[in-house]
Every structure is written in C-alpha cells, then in structure tokens.
Amino acid sequence: MHRRLTNLRFWIMVFAVGWLLMVFVFIAFWPEPGEESPDELAAQVTNALRAHDFHRLEPLLAVGGEDVAKSTVEYFRTARVERGTYRDGAVVVEYTHAGTRAEFRLPVEMQDGRYVVNPVLTPKG
C-alpha cells in the first residue's frame, strides 16, 4: 500500500480519472439555455440588461454568443431599463435614454423546447 501511494503513475491516473469525473458532473448539471416560458425569458433579459451583465444575457440568446451579448448590453450601458415584457412574439424592453423613453424589441424563438431571444436580424428565405 505504501508503495502505491508513493508511485507517481498512480497519482497521475487518480488525477486524470478525477478530472474526467468532474467534467462529466459539470456537463450533467449545466443549465439549459433559454427559459421555460416567454414571461420568464422577459424577466431574465430585463434583469441582465439592468445589471449590464452580458454573462447572464448570453445563455438567453438564440445566436451570436458572447459578442452579441456584449454589444446588446453595451447598447444599454447609458440607459435606464424600466421594464421588460413579452408581447406580440417578442421581449419588449422599455428604457429611458437621455430623457427619452423608447422600446427595444427582441424577437423570441423556441429552441429545444426552451424560449430564447434573437437580437440579430437574419434574412428569411
């Protein structure tokens, strides 16, 4: 037993198996992208934009990933987000910028049974 505990190959193998086990556990508990309902999606998008947190916005996007999340959050950097609701197939974020009230529409899509927003306009065809 003492010989096994001082063997470097044994510890390398234990480390490799432990690392693989950790990766499998993290993948199994990785949160699904999007939300279960459009209203929950609207609330999460609004909270992410209020907090200027692109990491919270990124898993709610249908396309674009980190770059689109950063640019969307940057768009709201100097604005005050009032509220967000789901209306007419889109998350509508109401905000105030330089004293002017406006709305920002993010079309909602369904991917793998979960609702996500698509801030990138793509041609249909």
Image (cartoon, grey):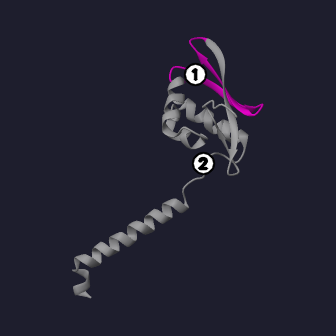
Q: Amino acid at mark 1?
A: Arg
54 vs 83, left or right, is: left
* Count of marks, rendered view: 2
Q: Secondary structure at mark 2?
A: loop
Which numbered tag is attached to residue 80? 1
Give the CA distance from mark 2 to mark 1. 26 Å
Report which quarter residue 18 is drawn in: bottom left
Q: Position of residue 74 (x, y in %)?
A: 50, 26
> In the rendered structure, which segment of residues is drawn in magenta?
76-99
Density class for disc 2 (Cα within 10 Å; few <14, some 14-19, many ≥20) is: some
Please determine whether, in this image, residue 59 is positioned above or below residue 30: above
Q: Position of residue 41 (x, y in %)?
A: 67, 40
Q: Which residue is mark 2?
A: 33
Q: Secondary structure at mark 1?
A: strand
Q: Position of residue 114 (x, y in %)?
A: 68, 48
Magenta stretch contains residue 82:
yes
Task: Name the residue: 23% across, 76% down.
Answer: 8
N-term mark: 2 or 1: 2
Dominant secondary structure (helix, strand or loop) of the stretch shown in magenta? strand
